[in-house]
Image: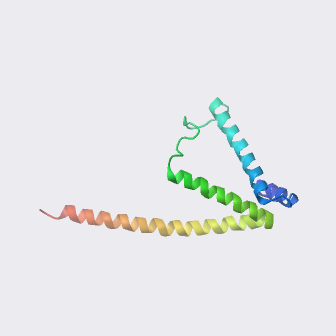
Amino acid sequence: SLSSVVNARTIKVFSSAPLSLHNSVLYFFGIIFNANTYVLGKAGVVPINSDASFLEGYDNIYAILVILLNSMIGIIITALYKYGDAVTKCFAQVLSSIILVIISFMFFISLFLLTRKRCQTLNKAQSTPF
């Protein structure tokens, strides 16, 4: 919450700057903090649970989609800070969480029903005598 308020205040103070500049600054600091965490983890200062290389796992289409969607979320949040405030962002996060729960429920219940139907079909096929 504190970082949301600080980011919103920073964007409001420098509101004459273009939105792309705000995004560049925010992403720059994200790169700095994440690179420091990675380097400190490899040096053994910060405990990490993996011996993976820096770009390991990014050859998967789902990983690339997560990166692209999170980038779009960052751009949207910056616009929200510029034209709204941190409280608006909090309400938007709550609403998006509710929507994601509903979508996840619909997706996973349909997946569950399809899997259950397939299992029932396989059980019937196995129980039929030859």
**Would you say 109 lies left or right of 34 here?**
left
Relative vertical location of residue 122 with respect to residue 37 in this rendering, above or below: below
Q: Residue at x 70, y 44 (%)?
A: 31
Q: How is the image coloured?
A: rainbow
Report the front residue among 32 and 115. Answer: 32
Relative vertical location of residue 118 with respect to residue 28 in this rendering, above or below: below
- Please indicate, yes or no, whether residue 36 appears anywhere in the rendered image: yes
Relative vertical location of residue 60 with respect to residue 93 in this rendering, above or below: above
The picture places residue 40, in percent across and down from the top left corner, at: 67, 34
Q: Quadrant of the N terminus?
A: bottom right
Q: Residue at x 55, y 37 (%)?
A: 50
**Would you say 92 lies left or right of 54 here?**
right
Report the front residue among 46 and 77. Answer: 77
The picture places residue 70, in percent across and down from the top left corner, at: 63, 56
The picture places residue 60, in percent across and down from the top left corner, at: 50, 49
Report the front residue among 66 and 106. Answer: 66
